[in-house]
Amino acid sequence: MTKIISLSLDDNLMKEIEGIEKEMQFSGRSELIREGIRALLDDKKSRDALFGEIECILIAVHDEKAEDDITKIKHRYENIIKTQIHNNLKNSKCLEVFVLNGGAGVIRKFSNELQTCRKVSYTKLIVA
């Protein structure tokens, strides 16, 4: 059974979606959004499959104004952060690169916490 949902998007995100829709020739915005959800679910399944001690890189992009919130999150995970690189980007954005080493569960929790933080616009976990 198909469900119809309502979704609110800001103008910048809408422009990006329309650009992707046109460039990748999706049949419509709904199909593009369904594909994005499938990609998110696949990413979650990959994270859930991690076990044991792992080494990885976690990338996050956030608004410069969110620095205090990001710092609070990362301090909870200092024991698994081996290296952190912070770089200022254009348009008041910041890039964080974390080299992590630790238990898969803790790394997954850190990654999820950043990903679900409303002030973080992008995250990517890359497992070595």
Image: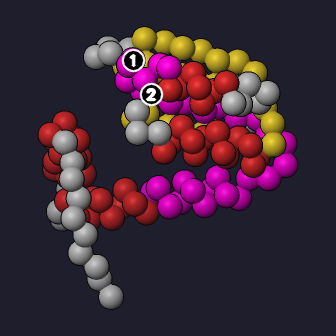
Number of numbered labels in the structure image = 2
Left of 89 or right of it: where is 11? Answer: left
Q: Residues within 10 Å of mark 1 (few under 14, many from 20)?
A: some
* The C terminus: image quadrant: top right
> Magenta stretch?
39-68
Cα–Cα gap, marks 2 and 1: 9 Å
Q: Quadrant of residue 56?
A: top right
Left of 52 or right of it: where is 24? Answer: left
- In the image, is residue 56 above or below residue 32? above
Residue 58 on the magenta span: yes
* Amino acid residing under circle 1: Glu
Q: Is residue 127 visible?
A: no
Q: Quadrant of residue 79?
A: top right
Identity of the residue drawn at 28% across and 79% down: 3
Q: Are marks 2 and 1 in contact (CB under 8 Å)?
A: no
Name the secondary structure under disc 2: strand
Give residue 65's position: percent from left, percent from top: 38, 19
Q: Nearer the viewer, residue 121 or 126?
A: 121
Identity of the residue drawn at 15% across and 40% down: 11
Residue position marked by numbered label 1 in the rendering? 64
Give residue 12's position: percent from left, percent from top: 19, 36
* Amino acid residing under circle 2: Val
Name of the residue lying farthest toward the bottom: 1
Give residue 62's position: percent from left, percent from top: 42, 27
Left of 106 or right of it: where is 117? Answer: left
Residue 80 on the magenta span: no
Identity of the residue drawn at 21% across and 48% down: 9
Residue position marked by numbered label 2 in the rendering? 61
